[in-house]
Image (cartoon, rainbow, N blue to C red):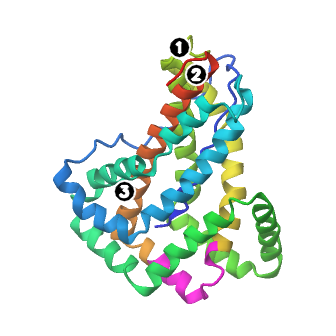
Amino acid sequence: MSLSRLLPVVLGALALAGGAGQALPPAMAQTVPAPSEAVEPIRAFTDLMMMDGVLDVMRAEGLANGAELAADLPGGATDPGWQAELTRIYDTGAMRETFDKALAARLSGDPQALAAATEFFGSELGQRVLKLEIDARRSLLDKEVEKATELAFEDLVRQNPARVKKLERFAEVNDLVESNVMGALNANLAFFTGIADEGGKLAGMDEQEMLATVWEGEAQTRADTQRWLYPFLMLAYQPLPDGDLEAYTAFSDTPEGRRTNAAVFAAFDALFTDISHRLGEAYARRLTGQDI
């Protein structure tokens, strides 16, 4: 399991799709939030997983993406109304609550997976990899660092193909490419739905038309995912000897690791879908000059 599920949401172009498109593959089943009594043990687990640090990075990424998105808005990125919308949407306390409830809905009924994940991520190696992942994500907020990391990965491909294969195996075991692509497409659909729900310019599209629009971006989303993911993995795990990376991969490949990974992906999908839908609503409001 890896927190590299946190790829930035890739928002598709707002141009309407022409003709019929292929339907989006079935999304992960919608997660029903767990009752409050089931959340406390999960909150202890997400504390162990350094979730507050993860969400801080997500917030920084979201604010940066929101500034880019505002280029099409009348007031631009400096519009106080848009800034207020982003502050409300990327409130880390609310984000943590959404994530913990969604994770509890999937993981609280699987004590074996929760115990195994707690044991691994509570170990010295587990805590080290979590910190490395967060530090790498924070570093990649800098576009120059991101470009330099991409170039460094190209060098690694030429100079150390064995290490690259270990990173690829880790990504394969954790299903990082496919899960990130599907998560991004689901988030894009939620963004479009949010615009439509606020009466924005997608309001005349039915669900199939929105699905077709989202699906048109699948190939580009997959390419962007792969271009970002492998340099990130290289940067995050660079300090790890091969044996530690193999141990991390081995845990991820256990039945408990796979079930935990699926639960974490589902929780992030719930969080990203919620954020993206509210971002679409906010975008439509600012286009029409509405206040919060």
- Label 2 residue SS: helix
Q: Quadrant of residue 68?
A: top right
The disc at residue 263 is 3
The disc at residue 199 is 1
Mark 2 lies on residue: 284
Q: Is residue 223 left or right of residue 114?
A: right
Q: Residue furthest top?
A: 204
Q: Earlier in the sequence, mark 2 or mark 3?
A: 3
The three-letter amino acid code for the residue at tag 3 is Ala
Q: CB under 8 Å between callouts 1 and 2?
A: yes
- Label 1 residue SS: loop
How busy is the neighbourhood of tag 1: few (under 14 within 10 Å), some, or many (20 plus)? some
How busy is the neighbourhood of tag 2: few (under 14 within 10 Å), some, or many (20 plus)? many
How busy is the neighbourhood of tag 3: few (under 14 within 10 Å), some, or many (20 plus)? many
- Rounded to the nearest angstrom, the CA distance separating label 2 from label 3 is 32 Å
Q: Which residues are magenta?
A: 236-250
Whether 150 is drawn above or below 15: the answer is: below
Task: Pinpoint residue 127: horizontal percent, then vertical percent.
Answer: 45, 79
